């Protein structure tokens, strides 16, 4: 049987109110650091679970955190969510997830649910959509304890957030590829709103390397969806492409196709993916890729939301640089 607050208070030698202030993350807590740590340690060891229903009935925030997430989220976002759940569970919080895709009304309904269940905070893993052209910033601004993952495109206010430095890493990649001898570096893009930071870094890297920006070397994924891997490969060959910045899923298919066509990788074309998906090692040559450092991102998101809940100051933005994973599909970068 799990312990309750009264049990833990007795073991530590503090009042029930003092133990409750620690376990409920009260901003007013007159308990020493030593006893606070002991209370939290015992709570974990004894599998203490707060009475969320009682808190909701009293109108108090519970140990519940709402997460807004796209139902078609890419693999790194799913990994961030999984690691965030593990991190916050260790701190005694449960997650309530609001899932939908490109539907603002459903997202807003999820936010109302979070409010109804007195969520202590909100982590927005999705907050803007380029295709349907909407964002959730105005609505999220009504919730004081809100943390974003990713760069907000047009914030109503400055949100605490964790970002991946796509601009910096793609600038570095373009200059490194140029240094390795590449002169016609193609970039796979999607909706402008989603590719803006990557495009910014790509163009900056070309400028630093003294290479011209060539619009024909932009591979739009919206058009590529109608092409086979063979057609995509032939297009790159026709454009005399000697390096391609793509995603792992497209990159692996192209590696197989180029190998079939007798194109030597990386001597004739270098391929760099994104997201470090497991199947990137299932082909030869293995795909050089970018790892999103999902564990680091999740921990930073978790620390920010916990600090907000505790009314502690937080930095507005944490920036994480994706890590280059060097494999055989590129020269040494």
Image: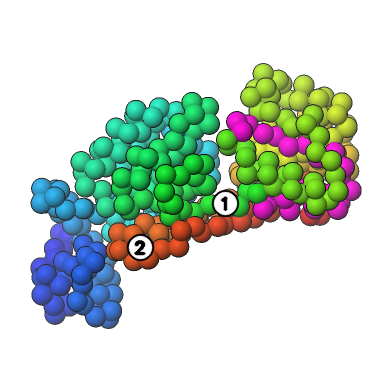
Percent position of residue 97, x then y:
34, 41
Foreground pick, 252 / 145: 145
The dot on residue 164 is: 1
Q: Is residue 244 left or right of residue 132?
A: right
Residue 170 belongs to magenta span = yes
Residue 327 visible somewhere in the drawing: no
Residue 15 belongs to magenta span = no
Marks 2 and 1 in Cβ contact (< 8 Å): no
Q: Is residue 221 left or right of residue 70?
A: right
Say few, some or many: other residues with alpha carbon within 10 Å of mark 1 (under 14 / 14 to 19 / 20 or more): many
Q: Which residue is mark 2?
A: 307
Q: Is residue 218 left or right of residue 98?
A: right
| Residue found 62% across the figure and 44% down from its top | 197
Percent position of residue 207, x then y:
80, 48
Say few, some or many: other residues with alpha carbon within 10 Å of mark 2 (under 14 / 14 to 19 / 20 or more): some
Residue that lies at the very extreme toward the front in this rendered image: 156
Q: Which of pointers 2 and 1 lies earlier in the amino acid sequence?
A: 1
Residue 163 visible somewhere in the drawing: yes
User: Quarter of the image holding residue 247?
Assistant: top right
Percent position of residue 90, x then y:
34, 60
Range shown magenta: 168-192
Percent position of residue 34, x then y:
27, 81
| Residue found 68% across the figure and 52% down from its top | 169
Foreground pick, 118 / 144: 144
Q: Disc 1 on helix, strand or loop?
A: strand
User: Quarter of the image holding residue 315?
Assistant: bottom left
Q: Is residue 248 above or below residue 315?
A: above
| Residue found 78% across the figure and 31% down from its top | 215
Report, in whole angstroms, how far the alpha carbon at label 2 lies from the one at label 1: 21 Å
């Amino acid at each position: 049987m799990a312990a309750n607050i009264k049990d833990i208070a007795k073991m530590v030698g503090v009042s029930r109110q003092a133990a409750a202030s620690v376990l409920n993350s009260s901003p007013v807590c007159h308990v020493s650091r030593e006893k606070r740590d002991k209370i939290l340690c015992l709570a974990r060891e004894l599998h203490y679970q707060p009475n969320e229903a009682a808190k909701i009935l009293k109108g108090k925030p519970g140990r519940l955190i709402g997460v807004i997430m796209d139902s078609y989220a890419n693999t790194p976002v799913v990994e961030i969510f999984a690691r965030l759940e593990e991190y916050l569970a260790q701190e005694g919080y449960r997650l309530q997830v609001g899932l939908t895709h490109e539907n603002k009304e459903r997202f807003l309904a999820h936010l109302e649910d979070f409010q109804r269940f007195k969520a202590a905070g909100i982590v927005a893993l999705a907050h803007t959509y380029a295709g349907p052209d909407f964002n959730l910033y105005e609505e999220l601004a009504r919730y004081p304890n809100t943390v974003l993952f990713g760069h907000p495109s047009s914030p109503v206010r400055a949100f605490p957030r964790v970002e991946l430095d796509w601009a910096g890493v793609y600038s570095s990649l373009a200059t490194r590829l140029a240094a390795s001898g590449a002169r016609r570096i193609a970039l796979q893009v999607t909706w402008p709103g989603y590719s803006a930071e990557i495009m910014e870094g790509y163009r900056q890297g070309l400028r630093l390397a003294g290479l011209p920006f060539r619009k024909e070397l932009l591979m739009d994924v919206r058009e590529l969806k109608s092409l086979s891997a063979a057609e995509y490969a032939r297009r790159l060959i026709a454009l005399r492409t000697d390096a391609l910045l793509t995603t792992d899923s497209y990159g692996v298919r192209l590696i197989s196709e180029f190998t079939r066509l007798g194109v030597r990788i990386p001597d004739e074309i270098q391929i760099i993916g994104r997201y470090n998906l497991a199947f990137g090692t299932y082909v030869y040559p293995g795909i050089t890729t970018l790892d999103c450092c999902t564990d680091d991102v999740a921990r930073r998101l978790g620390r920010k939301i916990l600090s907000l809940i505790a009314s502690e100051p937080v930095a507005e933005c944490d920036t994480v640089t994706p890590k280059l994973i060097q494999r055989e599909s590129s020269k040494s970068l």
